[in-house]
Image (cartoon, grey):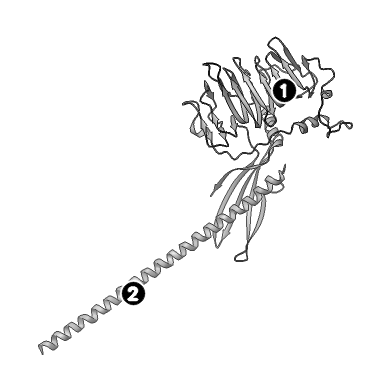
Amino acid sequence: MKYLNTYLKNGGFAIVATFLLILIILTLAAVLINISYSEFSQAELNKNDIKAYFLARSGAETLADYIIKTSPKSWSGSKSEVIIYDNNTNNKYNILSEIKINTSADTPPDFNLISTATVNGRKKTISVLVKKPELSAIYAKSELDLTKMTSVNVPPEQKVETKSSVIKYNDGDLNEDQIILNSDKKFVTVDWYNEYNKLFDDDENFDATNPLTIDDIPTDFNGSLINSSGYYGDLTYNPNDSLEINFDNNEIINIFVDTLSIKGTLECTGIDFPPDSNEYDEKLNIFVKESMTFQTPNVSLQNFNIFLMKDANLTLIGSTDTTTQNGIFVYGPEASMTLQSTVTFEGSIIVDQLIGKTDNSNPMGTFTYNGPPSQQALNYIKSKLGDYNAYYKANWSRE
């Protein structure tokens, strides 16, 4: 009887232990199933989030590429719909995009594209700003080395950028947030002949297919006075020479040269308002085919723009200021610019290479950003950049 009682007691414990073990196993199984289901659900959500994100981005990319390709001057409506097909599932996705346009009468519009896609209840919104390349203090396609300069004076809100991965500068000249490396801006060189031909848009007898010759120089040009737009060949002005540009009958004077060397005096006359006013409209554009050397006293003109053709070079030689309070705009995305000796340049630059040369122990000089001082002058430069360059995707953001 003693052994039987022991057996019965042990058998009862085994049954309880078995039930407990089964309960534990069932509980663990339930937990594991719940975890697996949660992970599966989260994976599905993540998959839907990722798909919604890329669909929204695809919608924005599609509209952005269309704008870059067509360069519209305006846009009707504030909504657009992009339809994308999934070849794997044969699903069709309608992606809605809101189009916000920032524009003015004088400059190309900016397009802020806000694209939204929804997949199985998961919604993602992507936005991209599509705009024309804007003015920078300095832009160079090649790497920038500003360490030879006496100083670089750029306001905090202005940028110094390069398409390369290197900008060298001295401590204190620039802040890190002013530096843009690997810029995605794409500037296009001005077509010298095309710009010249625009001078004759109203002349029915002008043959735009013929190359420019020495005969194209205005017949009334006496070597010291320019009072009309035109082609002026090779011009050289030594230290004792002077060149007067008279605006009496012109708002814009476009000067086209093969080479231009100004080491004497350059004076702009016939301006409606004094040089310290922001109200006058006169604009001087110099289109340089090969080279320009500029060593001259200050030029008081708000809209002084130098356009360099492919492989052209602009050389500024000190020790005199290039401008006073008004900035020069230099545009030559496939050209080079040389700051030599102790020149002080006040303006903004878009070139392939910015080169510094020293004169004995003298540094290459000082750069001071001095953009167009009036909104009218700034709009003129923006419109020029807009004429020459296509839209690009400036920056992306997501919600």
Image location (x, y in percent) of residue 191: 74, 34
Q: Residue at x 77, y 33 (%)?
A: 194
In depth, the one of 248 and 138 nearer the eye is 138
Residue 18 placement, left or right of 180: left
Taking depth in this image into account, of 120 and 214 the one nearest to the observer is 214
Instruction: Give the distance between the C-alpha atoms of the residues marked 1 and 2, in whole angstroms.
Output: 91 Å
Counting residues from the start of the chain, the first of labels 1 and 2 encountered is 2
Name the residue type under label 2.
Leu
> Residue furthest toward the front?
360
Q: Amino acid at mark 1?
A: Thr
Work out which quarter of the rendered image holds the N terminus and state it: bottom left
In front: label 1 or label 2: 1
Q: Secondary structure at mark 1?
A: strand
Residue 376 x/y as whole percent: 69, 28
Secondary structure beneath label 2 = helix
Query: Is residue 334 shown above or below 57?
Result: above
User: Which residue shows up at 53% across the image and 16% down it?
Assistant: 362
Question: Where is mark 1, residue-wise?
Answer: 259
Please say if the residues under marks 1 and 2 sit with CB atoms less than 8 Å apart.
no
Where is residue 255? Give x, y as percent.
Answer: 75, 24
Farthest-out residue, right = 205
Q: Dot 2 surroundings within 10 Å: few (below 14), some, or many (20 or more)? A: few
The residue beneath circle 2 is 26
Tell me residue 68's x, y (percent): 68, 45
Seen from this angle, which residue lies furthest top? 240
